[in-house]
Amino acid sequence: MAVLPLLLCLLPLAPASSPPQPASPSPCPRRCRCQTQSLPLSVLCPGAGLLFVPPSLDRRAAELRLADNFIATVRRRDLANMTGLLHLSLSRNTIRHVAAGAFADLRALRALHLDGNRLTSLGEGQLRGLVNLRHLILSNNQLAALAAGALDDCAETLEDLDLSYNNLEQLPWEALGRLGNVNTLGLDHNLLASVPAGAFSRLHKLARLDMTSNRLTTIPPDPLFSRLPLLARPRGSPASALVLAFGGNPLHCNCELVWLRRLAREDDLEACASPPALGGRYFWAVGEEEFVCEPPVVTHRSPPLAVPAGRPAALRCRAVGDPEPRVRWVSPQGRLLGNSSRARAFPNGTLELLVTEPGDGGIFTCIAANAAGEATAAVELTVGPPPPPQLANSTSCDPPRDGEPDALTPPSAASASASAKAAEAGPPTDHGVQVTEHGATAALVQWPDQRPIPGIRMYQIQYNSSADDILVYRMIPAESSSFLLTDLASGRTYDLCVLAVYEDGATGLTATRPVGCNRFSTEPALRPCGAPHAPFLGGTMIIALGGVIVASVLVFIFVLLMRYKVHGGQPPGKTKASAPVSSVCSQTNGALGPTPAPPAPEPTAPRAHTVVQLDCEPWGPSHEPTRP
């Protein structure tokens, strides 16, 4: 029993179990300085000559500085598990690529510096996971594209976004409009040519907007600009003021910038680039009355068109004004036309109907509008029945060769009939413009002299054929009253109009006045058969005469050969009886008798080829052959 109290007395003297020790910190990367003695932990590696993110980083670090190195790529594993990192600086490296999800574990990160690198684009997954990011610095890169969803994870927390000194021509303005807490937005020194209206209307905390040195010709009014006073310099500005910098842009000082000119703000270095009357003048020194616009004026519209059903049709409308008018089209039924399965509207004012239907005919209205007003013009379209199938004419001769001049002739009865039918199908012809002579590829156009009208600079001829929707223009000097068209296609109907281009004394702008229109048809290309040309006859006679001569020579040679064979190879002057004959015996009974040596032939006589069989008597003294 005495042992128990002793044990109870010794029990407090036993060593208590020690608490678990924290894991030992990772070794500091070579050439880096690490602060591990107190929290927060820092890894500082600026200008250390690193080629990649060191793999032996302490994953508990709250600050990581890797600026002024030669890192080219940020990989997924480089920053993995660094959930406590608050500040990351990768400035002034050679980073070209950031892997998708490279920052996915940095959910506590507040500031990310990627300026001074070589990034060309920023996709949707490269900033994923940065849900607490406050400052994003992307200046001095080569960014040409910013994905619409690149800032989704940090849209509600971002306070400072710097995209300056890049190559951005377009921005995801809808995504930028969701940055409700941003107070500094740097877009300067890019290639932005336009800003949509209302792009900053939801940025209620915006305190500084820098759009210096872009390609902006105008800045649209924004509710944000009208709500806050605009100042050029942040010094001494109240907390509720918006500092707007827009110098270094080619500003077009017209009525669209009057709102900006009326705002009270300090001096800055903005200047006007256009119109010519205001080019180079200090923006704040130009009076409000000089910021003017010019209403639109329609300078050209398509003449009345007639196309068969199923064919395309192009309606054209051109207008001038300041600012440049926007052209829209209204159908004959009063509907506003745009891009669809059957129609395409182009920014230059052209409306193309891909496939016409009989119900498409009527009066189309072209509306040109800008900030100063609008102008309208009507274009008539006639849609006829589909064309019949074309059959080849087998009784006609070859068409004229390319480049062969086409003689001008008075209109024939066929072309006059075609012109009459075309005139019935289309609008009435204005006889102020006459097409007096025309052939298959040329036509002579004449119009009344308009020089008594003051201010005429030149004439403009517009024409196109029923099979071609492309309108052709010709500019004619003011002193002319006729013009020869030499680029027409044969067998087609043409609509032609002559317009006088003059200077409007009231507005000082160049305007057009129609002189007249005409519709005519060119001659068909196929020509009726006629007598052969003289060169063709001469060549044929020479060939026939040569053939007769050659045939005569061949017949003469054939006759000589036949006579030569009939006379046994002897000349025609000698007969066979007068030729020397030798006694020649042939074998008749199988026995071969003695054969004398043949006599030597005469030098002038050819050897005989005819063998004569003779039955001879036995040779003896009395039968010695007689030699010649």
Image (spheres, helix red, strand yellow):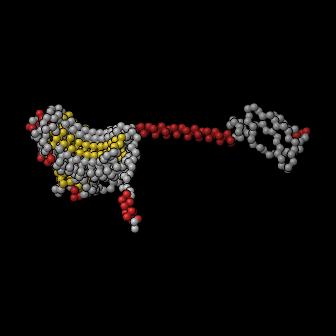
In which quadrant will I find the C terminus?
A: top right
Name which residue lies at 62% across and 41% down: 558
Residue 27 percent across, percent down from the top left: 40, 45
Q: Which is more toward the observer, 25 or 537?
A: 25
Residue 452, compared with residue 24, is above or below; it is above
Q: Toward which corner of the image does residue 264 lie, by quadrant?
A: top left
Q: Which is more toward the observer, 33 or 524?
A: 33
Residue that lies at the very extreme toward the bottom in this rendered image: 1
Residue 281 percent across, percent down from the top left: 15, 32
Q: Which is more toward the observer, 254 or 168?
A: 168
Let me know if residue 18 appears in the view. Answer: yes
Let me know if residue 428 appears in the view. Answer: no
Residue that lies at the very extreme toward the right in this rendered image: 621
Residue 221 percent across, percent down from the top left: 15, 45
In which quadrant will I find the N terminus?
A: bottom left
Q: Which is more toward the observer, 534 or 26?
A: 26
20 relative position to 469: left or right: right
| Tally of numbered tags | 0
Residue 463 percent across, percent down from the top left: 24, 44
Name which residue lies at 23% across and 45% down: 160
Q: Toward which corner of the image does residue 386 lie, by quadrant?
A: bottom left
597 relative position to 107: left or right: right
470 relative position to 612: left or right: left
Name which residue lies at 25% across and 48% down: 134
